[in-house]
Image (spheres, helix red, strand yellow):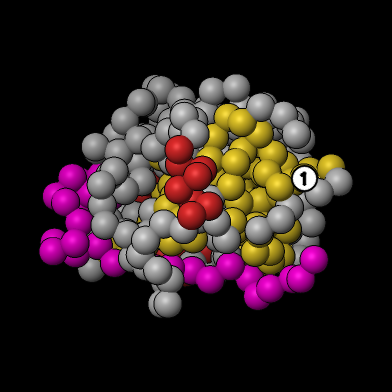
Amino acid sequence: MAILNPPRRIHRVLTAGLVPAAAAVLLLGGCGGAPAGTASVKESGEPAARTEAENRAASVKVPEATTYTTVRGAPKDPAPDGVTDGLVVNPSTALPVLDRPDGRRIATLPTRQLGGPTWVPVVETSGAWRRVLLPSRPNNATGWISGEGLRTARTPYTVRVDLGRRVLTLAKSGREVGRWRVAIGGAETPTPTGRTFLLATLTRNEKEPSPLVLPLGAHSATLDTFGGGPGTVALHGWPDASVFGKAVTHGCVRVPDDALKALSRVPLGSLVLIRA
């Protein structure tokens, strides 16, 4: 298996000309991901048309595994507190997602979403099969994909969010490189717990409330939608430092400016471990 460079970040700039007004509302609220139907930014040299393999995958009546969908029958993450060796994968073509090796097809993993490549962490290996975390509902959903047709990389980063202490820590190669007080979800809109990952990077022209939003592969357990989006939980900045250490958000994690700067260097697919 060839190990490539770490996943490249695609910073998607939100401007009035490219993104519907609903996205601005959504990002100002700080949760939810980008609204469906927003134009994607293609990587240099990538053809706009679907490949034959992607067309075949799309023809099967199962959902794409994206932040907008629910994957029914997806096996639950067996180790929601577990760390991995940092292996992350990106499908070079849309791949079937199965409920077990050589099992039933439950979804399709697309090559891209939210304007960038779909990088997901591998949490288990069985022969040529890889068990990965999915960005879809329900939270803690996993699926099995073939090891063929994957771009691979390793990320040294792990993000941990301790909801009880309201602290976020960032580790690189097992060594803590940053620790910050953060704001978490309130009593009626708690931040979900478990093992998830950094799904995408969204940037905004405006500096407040946050110039950068980092959606995760997790969703609010109490909100089906937020600001027109699918209730995706994210890490993002906040201009009022008095919120840090408090449970006041709609489920997202608000972080200080220096934490956001450090998190902006974390590759897509990196693990985010959220515990109560």
Badge 1: how crowded within 10 Å, few (<14), some, or many (20+)? Answer: some
Foreground: 167 or 61? 61
Q: Quadrant of residue 114?
A: bottom left
Secondary structure found at label 1: strand
Residue 237 rendering spot, x and y as whole percentages: 38, 57
Residue 165 rendering spot, x and y as whole percentages: 59, 40
Residue 95 rendering spot, x and y as whole percentages: 58, 47
Q: Quadrant of residue 210?
A: bottom left
Residue shown at 52%/63% (left/top)? 263
134 over 270 or under it: above or below: above
Residue shown at 32%/59% (left/top)? 40
183 over 71 or under it: above or below: below
Which residue position is annotated with label 1?
Answer: 129
193 over 182 or under it: above or below: above
> What type of secondary structure mainly makes up the magenta span?
loop
Residue 120 rendering spot, x and y as whole percentages: 60, 51
Q: Is residue 20 magenta?
A: yes
Q: Is residue 248 left or right of residue 179?
A: left
Q: Is residue 144 left or right of residue 22?
A: right
Q: How many marks?
A: 1
Residue 2 visible in the current orientation? yes
Residue shown at 53%/71% (left/top)? 8
Q: Is residue 120 left or right of residue 137?
A: right
**Where does the N terminus fall, quadrant-wise?**
bottom right
**Where does the C terminus fall, quadrant-wise?**
top right
Residue type at the position of mark 1: Trp
276 over 42 or under it: above or below: above
Foreground: 249 or 75? 75
Residue shown at 66%/59% (left/top)? 150
Q: Provide the residue span drawn in magenta.
A: 1-28
Q: Is residue 121 magenta?
A: no
